[in-house]
Image (cartoon, coloured by chain):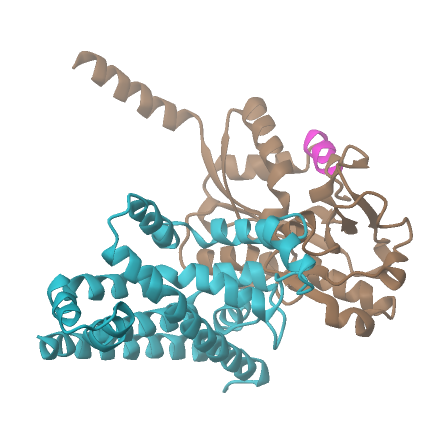
Amino acid sequence: MTLDDGDLSAIRLTLELATVVTVLLLALGTPIAWWLARTRSRLRHAVGAVVALPLVLPPTVIGFYLLLVLGPNGPVGKLTEALGIGLLPFSFGGLVLASVCYSLPFVVQPLQNAFEAIGPRPLEVAATLRAGPWDTFWSVAVPLARPGFLSGAVLGFAHTVGEFGVVLMIGGNIPDKTRVVSVQIYDHVEALEYAQAHWLAGGMLAFSFTVLLALYTWYPQAMKGRR
Amino acid sequence: MKHLAALLALMAWGTAQADDVQVAVAANFTAPMQKIAAAFEKDTGHKAVLAFGATGKFYAQIANGAPFEVLLAADDDTPAKLEAEHRTVAGTRFTYATGKLVLWSAQEGYVDGQGQVLKTGNYAHLAIANPKTAPYGAAAVETLTRLNLYDRVQGKLVQGENIAQTHQFVSTGNAALGFVALSQVYRDGKFTSGSGWIVPANLHSPIRQDAVILARGAANPAARALADYLKSNKARDIIRSYGYAL
């Protein structure tokens, strides 16, 4: 027994989702992480806590509130409807939004650590060389924080691939549209199609292990090379 | 110290007397079973310890040694399968309730008494439970096929992982309407909120929910007592009041 069309479609959809989400997470996570690493604002503790919430909340809680907030009676749902986008639940866009919320800490935290590890000195040196803040950020901070970007991207991607509860709740399990691999595995298991479930589940296990192994092998070297 | 010894003795006595029975209960039967378990404890002194969940998950857990003694499934296949695998007490399988399917909307007056809204309504999403894994989902697909509507609504279908999530999709308004279990939206002869069409039983095969005593409960008198209690008039009245047929 091998993978059927539904399985392949789920794999394709999952990779698309994880790619889009990772790009968005880097774009969104970088300024948040930079601010968290540099600010002295009292708000930083609250913002840091909000970002970390998905680490501790069960997916059913996040999924349930997203369903309420994005629904026709929720504030975001009313907004998206007024903007002519329509409602996000049960669409690819809804999956993207949910996954960005859910995987945010996996990108922000490594980035924040990387930015904090740079310390003030290189940035001060850049400033004395008359580099503006924007130039300093791109020419000094980003290259020095490269390990943070890579581990953030890898973890964000892998976590999006592995997420289940939230996508099931927001996605509505629609074939070819919102049925990702983790949901497909769940369907197989619930229907007692254990053989088919094994193919996908084994593949997911192998993928996750490979990704983490690569990260753990590469990360210490990158950190050493930086110093 | 003396108090502690007395307390321990009392606890030991307590467990020896009141038999506990571990019961796995289909999620759609949560509310009636809580009521039945309370009555069961009052009438027999035995205590039913309830776990609620998806029947497919219970199957996997039971096959892997979960300590359940009675299963109240959401279907009739799973108990039969467990029986064929000798994981049950032979001859104890019976139908404790027959589920009724309802087309329901959280909006008052949205669903008419004939379900015409399926054809005429301008809705974006129609929620059903996963037909592959949930009996109510399979019954919904069967109904739509019988009504020659399946092809027309296929693009609007969204699936909940189980009937509880399907209900959530509809009750939050994310899906304008959906096929849910009558037991979720019905109490004592009327809808608790929204509007609905109770799907006639001839539009789908019966949603028989079977119970069975599992091998682990073979020697537990409370397991047998619970199975008997589910067939009593008192329990059947509770079951009916939640919109199940018998």
Q: Is residue A141 left or right of residue B15?
A: left
Q: Is residue B238 magenta?
A: yes
Q: Quadrant of residue B143?
A: bottom right
The image position of residue A38, as x and y in percent, is 23, 57
Main SS of the magenta part reads: helix
Quadrant, the N terminus of chain B: top left
In the rendered image, residue B140, in percent from the top left (x then y), is placed at 75, 61
- Residue B216 makes an appearance in the image: yes
Stretch in magenta? B233-240
Q: Residue at x 61, y 61 (%)?
A: A89
Q: Position of residue B198 (x, y in %)?
A: 83, 49
In the image shown, does B77 or B52 lie closer to the viewer? B52
B129 with respect to B49 (left or right) = right
Q: Residue at x 55, y 39 (%)?
A: B224
Quarter where residue B15 is shown: top left
Comparing B3 with A213, the one in front is A213
Is residue A189 rendered to the left or right of residue B126?
A: left
The front one of B242 and A47 is A47
Chain in cyan, by letter, is: A
Residue ID at (15%, 64%) = A117
